[in-house]
Amino acid sequence: MTSTKLLYLAVFVGAIALVVGGANVLSAQAAPEGTLIGWCVDNGTNPYIYLEWGSHPSANSNGLQKADVSPSEDRFWGWLGTYDTQRSYTDYSISRGQTYWYRVKYRPELPSNVIAVSCPAYPTPTPTVYPTPTPYPSLTVWPTTQTVDSGQTLTIYAYGGTGSYFWTSPGGSQTTGYGQSVSFWYTNNTGSLQTYTVAVTSGTQTQYATIYVRSVYIYPTPTPTSISCSHNISYISSGAEVRLDATGYGSYFSWNAPYGYPSIGNGTPFRTRFYNSSGSTQSRWITVTNGYQTATCEVRVSSDVYPTPYPTWYPTPYPTYYPTPYPTWYPTPVPGVAIELTHVGRNVTRGQSGEYASVIAGGNDTLDLIVRVRNTTGNYLYNVVLTDVLPAGIYPIAGSTTVNNQQVGDGIASNGINIGTLAGYATTTVKLSVRVDPSAVPSWGSATTSNVMQARADGIASKSVLFRITLSNGTSVLASIGSVATGVEDALIPALAIALVAMGSYGAYTRTNTFRRRASISEIKARVGETANFSR
């Protein structure tokens, strides 16, 4: 009995020893050799957890596990999908302030050490404390309203605020400004009261002033009444004066009479002349204006020449003989005289295109009268007026007057034309075309007359220049001596006799003319030669 108990006791003690010894062996074999470590990498925006671990010699796997709650049981662990030879891992699936547990399973019964890693949450920011701004006094403007006249200067003041002021005054003489006060004015000519706003800003405060501006007085535009020109239709002869009157609103009347002499004028009555040598009655239209309305009058001008309806005779186109021109007389220049005149001309009907010191003309011939006006000083001449005093029987052709080849209005043969200002040493050329009336040409022989051009300007005396025109119908005293012998000795005495008879008649004729001079023997010989040459 005793030995059986001892045997059971020995077996029990041995069993206990075996159990205890076996437990120690298992404990020693389960101790892992690899160690898991890890930490949070915080880059400020996307933090992550980095893990590293070693291997175990008896491991058949090296799987990494993660638990996001306290891992008291295996059911909280999850595999992170690593492979056997992997020894590091980066976990991006984390949140700030959250703790995560990690371990490595070498075998199901051999886990590594367990580590807990977390990334800290953002700290609560400390609020910035801003000092309470120093309050500024209230901004005021004075005066807040004001009524002024158009153009009247006003001054507005500002008080309070930060002490710095900026002004705006749209529509004013000064639209912006700085300072405690600003001065400006408004203009109002609308005929009614206008309102403007002025603003001043100081810091964050703005105040306004209202300005009422009275308008300047606007005089109403007068309603003009109509004007009239009388007589509405007038009948005059060529060269006769016509008088026209204007009535109606206004005291100032301006006249325009194309082809008249004069062609323009002011006031009432208005007097002018019209010339008509067309062979039929012509109508001329005169307008008058007062600045608002215009009225028109008609003047019907009868012709002073009615041509004979037979074919016009043209001379045989032999070379035209032009006598040797007498030297043109020019007055001796006087110191201080500022205008110099040069007068030339040509017979357009006889085909002349140059410029000559004198011309020969017959009935119905057209002549160009040319005068050059030269300023002989270095100073300006103002209001230079040129007037043509035409001889009897020679009439101006309407619309033919030119100044430096530019057509101007008629009037040079009546009141003259104003060619304006003449610069120092400058020259202006004026041309007028005229027609020779057949009644002015002697039926036999010739007559000499002169055209006179006059020029005047402000501050100087007028100047004149002559241009000689010989009027001849083209007949010859030698046309009837075809039967005279052609020998020099035989023909001389009869020719001189006939010439003496002719020149006796010529002397009687010329005594009635302006020049009233006797013909000398040398003139008789010269005129016999001229007549013979002219008649060839």
Image (tube, rainbow, N blue to C red):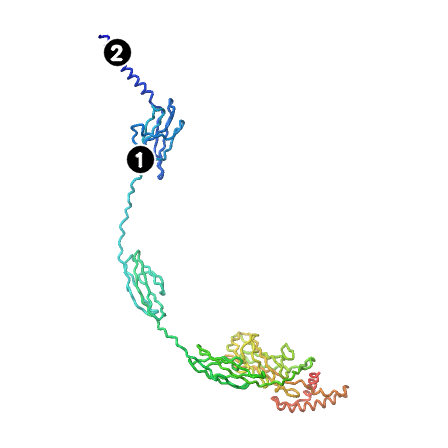
Say above or below: 209 vs 413. Answer: above
Could you say where residue 109 lies in the image, as x and y percent from the top left? Answer: 34, 23
Q: Quadrant location of residue 115? A: top left
Q: Quadrant of the C terminus?
A: bottom right
Q: Amino acid at mark 1?
A: Gln
Question: Which residue occupies 27% across, 52% down?
Answer: 133
Q: Report the number of discs.
A: 2
Q: Is residue 477 visible?
A: yes
Q: Is residue 455 visible?
A: no
Q: Amino acid at mark 2?
A: Ala
Given this view, does label 1 or label 2 mark the residue nearer the observer? 2
Closest to the observer: 258 or 165? 258
Closest to the observer: 302 or 422? 302
Q: Is residue 84 left or right of residue 258?
A: left
Mark 1 or 2 closer to N-term? 2
| SS label for mark 2 | helix
Q: Is residue 323 left or right of residue 99?
A: right
Could you say where residue 230 lies in the image, as x and y percent from the top left? Answer: 47, 84
Q: Quadrant of the N terminus?
A: top left
Could you say where residue 7 lies in the image, as x and y percent from the top left? Answer: 25, 10
Q: Is residue 320 left or right of residue 466?
A: right
Query: What residue sits right under mark 1 in the picture?
Result: 98
Closest to the observer: 490 or 444? 444
Crowdedness of circle 1 by 10 Å Cα count: few (<14), some, many (20+)? few
| SS label for mark 1 | loop
Q: Are marks 1 and 2 in contact (CB under 8 Å)?
A: no
Say above or below: 447 vs 167. Answer: below
Say above or below: 127 vs 118. Answer: below
Query: What residue sits right under mark 2 in the picture?
Result: 10
Could you say where residue 82 lies in the image, as x and y percent from the top left? Answer: 39, 29
Measure the alpha-carbon separation of dots 1 and 2.
Answer: 56 Å
Q: Quadrant location of residue 50? A: top left
